[in-house]
Image (cartoon, coloured by chain):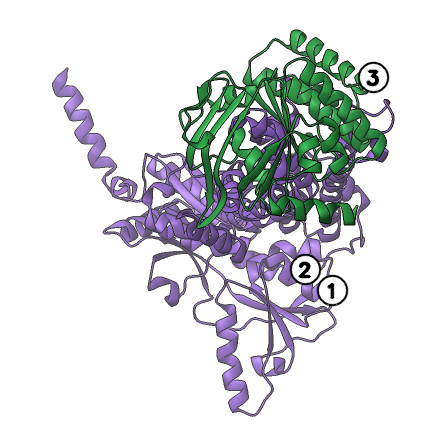
Amino acid sequence: MLHNLPPDPDCALSLRKLSKFYGEFLALDRISLDIAHGEKIVVLGPSGSGKSTFIRTLNRIEPHDSGVLMIDGEVIDDKTSLPLLRGAVGMVFQNYNLFPHLTVLENCILAPRLVRKAHRDATESLARAYLDQVGIGEQADKYPIQLSGGQQQRVAIARALCMAPDIILFDEPTAALDPEAIKGVIGIIDSLAERRITTICVTHEMGFARHIADRVVFMDKGVVLEASPPEQFFTAPQSARARQFLDQMIHHA
Amino acid sequence: MRLLTCLLLCLAALLSSASVRAQERPSFIENNTLSVCTNPTLPPMTFVNGADLSAIDGFDIALARELGALWHVPVTFKTMDFTGLFPSLAAGRCSLVISGVLKQAAREHLFDAVAYLDTSPVIVAPSQIAPVTSFEALAGQSLAVESGTSYAARIEEINRTLISRGKPPIALQQYPSEDQVVQQVLVGRSQNFLSQDVELFYRQAQLGGKLHVIFSPSLPGYSEFALYLRRSGQDKALLAAAIDTLKRQGKITALEKKWNVGKAARAALGVTSERPRFNTATFFSALFSMAFLKGAVMTLVIALASHAAAIVISIPIALKLNAPRSLWHPFLRAYVAVFRGAPTLLQLLFIWNALPQFFPIFREGWFSPFLATWICLSINESAYQVEINRAALSAIDPGQLAGGQALGMSPSQIYRHVIFPQALRVALPPTINEFISLLKTTSLASVISLQELLFITQVQVARSFEFTEYYAAALVYYLAMVFAFLHLQKRIETRFVWASRASAGGKTGPRIESPTDGTEASRHAA
């Protein structure tokens, strides 16, 4: 078992017995996992299983209470510089959390300018390059409210990329998107993997999971029950809970 | 040579020994200045003579100057509401009250009084009413008096007698200033008013023969004007000696003649010509006068300064109150509750009149009406602004904080560049509404003699008796200021193009600056 091995510094993320409490409630229960550079992980599980909490511990928006979290070979704890950590681990929120009072371009360059003290011109040309990459270069001077949901998500991805992260966390990236837009997100995440950027997506969308995942992590009640390639997970899940979950999803879909 | 000087000095001392005693300075002369509290709305005793507000004049003012000359000290005048005179004297804000105040036993319990001029109370009614000979003839009628004076108590006393004789009492109406008392009879709301004769001598020309004296009762306690001072050692005797000296020198008689008070004037109560209902020339000259412009500027400055301070005070309080409960909470809640709960007028009077009794430092000259008003309105307004700020901060999606955190921004960076600019848009319309309300609230500061628009208006009315004209001019100024800010509010709202899809549509609309350049929003909030 991974539990008793030392964390692996060659992985993008290496977790050992990672736990998180909310008061008495155990939200994450001794999670151990190794994730390679450039790997695409999809986290599945019923509501309240701890998926969102899990990815929020990875950039310390929700600090873990015990266990080891190692990112790029560095152990993450109270002493870790948050600006550095969050530079390495970007995040795209379910409802994007774009800053409505700033244009698309300003959304992208605000954090690099403030956190990295980066030069304005350099940041701006970098941001325009990322906006072009995610296919919304021509929207740079609009405000978020003028964009569609799919466009807003691309802005959120470009904004995260501007901090040059090694890992990007996605919280329900497909929740508010139409099928066309979901295809677009899949394309973007694939292109991130090509650049060895590790992605971890929390989702409910089975088709999306099957399409992009290198590995599916299945969680229930704060415990990781399975971590296996999608073909194995969707055809022959190991745990009874995962079988039950998949049955329900198929019925409801 | 030395001997000669000594001899000369001795001779001079001998010759002037009498006046030396009169000129011996009382202890209330502090910092080599005679400072006098007066309410300049009682012509011809003390009033603003002309458009320049600093130019107060009248019998009392001239008398104070004579006293200063006698003691060889400069005289400074502090103008205030009548009700503020004695609290200010008690607070040590001035040496003397010289303001056409009657010599009365009730006041002499607390302060020393020195009489300087004879007077007589008068009951005044429209000219078609026949004179009467006793208060009984006024039973059941209405009578206006100035509040804060002791007329009211005296009339209550007379009423008890009337009731005991089975007659209806006199219906008492109280108004905060002399000119308003007179106005009540002019407009017919009150049948009679009670005042002092000197007032009427002066008003005759302005009243246009519409009113006349129907009764001059002899009321003990209403027959002499007096100077009031704090009780202290020889001061009363020294002041009385000084008044005697002025009388002997004929100075008081000269002043009586100049200001048309005293016996000669009493005989000459005459009738003068009719006046127009609305004097357009007066209205326009008031509207374009320096005095009104200065008053409006003062109103604007005190409102802006108070609101700016209120915003600065209210932001940390709002942040603390929106944060999880802490030790601060009960104190901050109490602060907001007290300053929202207490009437603003009461807070002003408290700061101006009560504070100096506890902390003598507030008696000093630097504690001006402006400073007192600024402190009071800043604190008062901050209590309201806290609620606006809290609502605005609560309206911001918590995801904005998470979004900033996930990008590695520090809490202060998130507040400065993400939360505050958005909260500002939410807070701005109610803030401008508050400001407009504050702009009008500043008129309350006239009671502590801040020379803002309403104070200027009242002073001009008291002098000229042209109510409608000066009120109309003040109204024009207030409305002009309020409309200007309402217009500004609209302009600012259209600047927030990012807030709605509709207005964000075209590229023609004004763009908000990048916060990295320091927007108005973040500068305001920081």
- Which amino acid type is marked by label 2? Gly
Secondary structure category for the residue under label 2: loop
A104 sits left or right of B363 in the view = right
Residue sitting nearer the eye, B397 or B439 = B397
Q: Which chain carries label 3?
A: A
B91 sits left or right of B323 in the view = left
**The label number, if any, that marks residue A138 in the structure image:** 3
B159 sits left or right of B96 in the view = right
Q: Decide: few, some or many residues near mark 1? Use Cα within 10 Å; few <14, some 14-19, many ≥20.
A: few
Mark 1 vs mark 2: which is more N-terminal? 1
Measure the alpha-carbon separation of dots 1 and 3: 73 Å
- Which amino acid type is marked by label 3? Glu
Secondary structure category for the residue under label 3: helix
Circle 1 is placed at which residue position?
A: B187
In this view, the residue farthest toward the bottom is B166
Q: Can residue A151 be seen here?
A: yes
Residue B98's x, y, as percent? 44, 50
Circle 2 is placed at which residue position?
A: B270
Q: Quadrant of the N terminus of chain B?
A: top left
Residue sitting nearer the eye, A242 or B507 = A242
Residue B289's x, y, as percent? 70, 35
Q: Are marks 3 and 2 in contact (CB under 8 Å)?
A: no
